[in-house]
Amino acid sequence: MMPSDALLTLRQVNQKVRSVLARLRPEQKLCSAVTAGDFSALLGELLRAGECLRNLAANAAPASPVNPSGGSDEAAALEQEAREYRSHLEQLKRFLPVVHRRLLAEKTRLQNAQTHAAAVAAWALASKKTL
């Protein structure tokens, strides 16, 4: 993969991950802003970035590693995107356990509501039979 392709890929991935992170904010109490499709897309983007970075590392000449403090503007931009991607991964590492707990709480709430609705339906049916 060419560095320019890698730069474009990382920019796209960072933009999409940034969007998901904005909806995963810990102060957000409801999980409804994030869908199962969002998680699938997020996983796809993470896999895409991982493949991009592996290809970039494999194609880098061993004698001349990328020097973030010097070199081309493209190399500096690529290094910046890689740092931003790492920052996003660290944020996900912090946010995902919180989101997981919120989703488990929501699942429990929905199961309780379903149990209550079934009990009400059973009571209504039994009530009709006694009238």
Image (cartoon, rainbow, N blue to C red):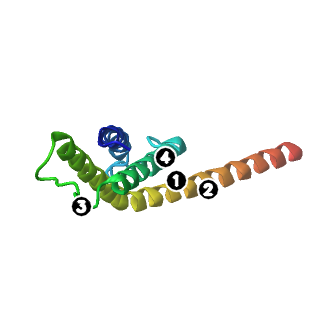
Callout 2, which amino acid?
Asn
Going by the numbered disc 3, the residue's amino acid type is Ala
Badge 1 crowding class, 10 Å Cα cut-off, few under 14, some 14 to 19, many 20 or more, is: some
In the rendered structure, find residue 44 and report the number of the disc placed on it: 4
Name the residue located 14 percent from the left edge and 47 percent from the top edge.
71
Where is mark 3, residue-wise? 63
Residue at which label 2 appears? 112
- As drawn, the residue found furthest toward the left would be 70
57 and 11: which one is in front? 57
Q: How far apart are labels 2 and 3 at the CA level? A: 62 Å
How far is mark 4 from mark 2, CA to CA? 33 Å
Q: What is the spatial separation of the Cα atoms under label 3 and label 1, in whole angstroms?
A: 53 Å
Q: Earlier in the sequence, mark 1 or mark 2?
A: 1
The label shown at residue 106 is 1
Q: Residue at x 46, y 51 (%)?
A: 47
Whether residue 102 sits left or right of residue 89 in the image: it is right
Label 2 near label 1: C-beta < 8 Å?
Answer: no
| Residue 22 x/y as whole percent | 32, 43
* Label 4 crowd bin: few (<14), some (14–19), many (20+), radius 10 Å: few
- Residue 4 image point, x, y percent: 30, 38
Q: Earlier in the sequence, mark 3 or mark 1?
A: 3
Local SS, label 1:
helix
Image marks 3 and 1: residues in contact by CB distance under 8 Å: no
Q: Height in image: 129 above or below 54?
A: above
